[in-house]
Image (cartoon, rainbow, N blue to C red):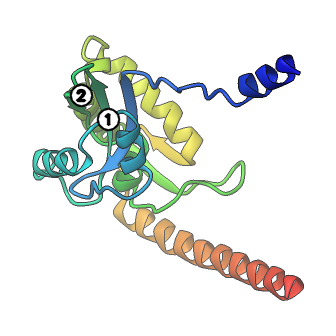
Amino acid sequence: MASKGAARVRKKEIVKVVHGALLRTNIKAQMASAAPPLGPQLGQRGLNVANFCKEFNKETGHFKQGVPLPTRITVKPDRTYDLEICTPTTTWLLKQAAGIGRGKASKDEIVGKLTVKHLYEIAKIKSRDKALQHVPLEQICRMLIKTCRTLGIDVQYHDLDPVELKEFLVARKEKVDAQLKDLADKKAAKMLRTT
């Protein structure tokens, strides 16, 4: 009988989860708050969430509000931390430069156009990141071109014609509006089926 009781006790043992010292997350500039997902992540590591949010919002004051910033938080055993804020995410920078809100929806869709000059400027911004400090600008530009392909942004090696670009953006806006209307119709049809 004693062995059954001991087995029950062993089943009820709780294993404490030990979180790593490094936390990588994207936080929007000037918008850190104790709400999920950031608050619980910091709380699990024993950090004072309110102080962290206050410090983060103060340090990101020079960024436009809402810009996604990759952040690395190194938690020390005495519950202090080192905060490393990187430059905005590559996809966000490319979307802003191309003037688009979202990437491609189908395989061969072109959602925006950029020149190599745009990519060079973005590469100069990204070269400030600790991870890319010793990477040549040419290689960073190649990485950006690959990301552009993934997003559906066409990279051109000559200057963009303003008239051609305006026509492209007007046609693109019409296409996006049609896609959003189709999505809304599908969502409405799905809601009708479930009710």
Q: Quadrant of residue 15?
A: top right
Classify residue 189 as left or right of residue 177. right
Quadrant location of the C terminus?
bottom right
Residue type for callout 2: Arg
Asked whether the beta carbons under mark 1 and mark 2 sit within 8 Å of each other, the answer is yes
User: Within 10 Å of the Cα at label 2, are there few (<14), some (14-19), or many (20+) other Cα atoms?
Assistant: few
For mark 1, does the 10 Å Cα neighbourhood hold few (<14), some (14 to 19), or many (20 or more) residues? some
Identify which amino acid the numbered label 1 is placed on.
Gly
Q: Is residue 177 above or below residue 51?
A: below
Q: Is residue 112 left or right of residue 48?
A: right
- The residue under the point 67% across, 82% down is 181
The location of residue 128, given as percent across then percent down, is 21, 26
Q: Is residue 124 left or right of residue 9?
A: left
> Please, which residue is most extreme toward the top here?
134
Q: Is residue 47 visible in this depiction of the protein? A: yes
Q: Nearer the viewer, residue 104 or 4?
A: 4
In the displayed structure, 86 sits above or below 35; it is above
Q: Which mark is residue 79?
A: 2
Judging depth in this view, the residue of 62 and 128 nearest the camera is: 62
Mark 1 sits on what residue? 46
Distance from label 1 to label 2 (Cα)? 6 Å
Q: Quadrant of the N terminus?
A: top right
The structure residue drawn at horizontal position 29% and vertical position 57%, both measured from the top left corner, is 33
Specify whether 191 is left or right of 91: right
Q: Residue 187 in the image: x percent, y percent? A: 74, 79
Quadrant in the picture for residue 122: top left
Comparing 125 with 51, the one in front is 51
Residue 110 drawn at (x, y percent): 59, 54
Q: Earlier in the sequence, mark 1 or mark 2?
A: 1
Query: Residue placed at 30% from the left, 14% from the top?
Result: 136
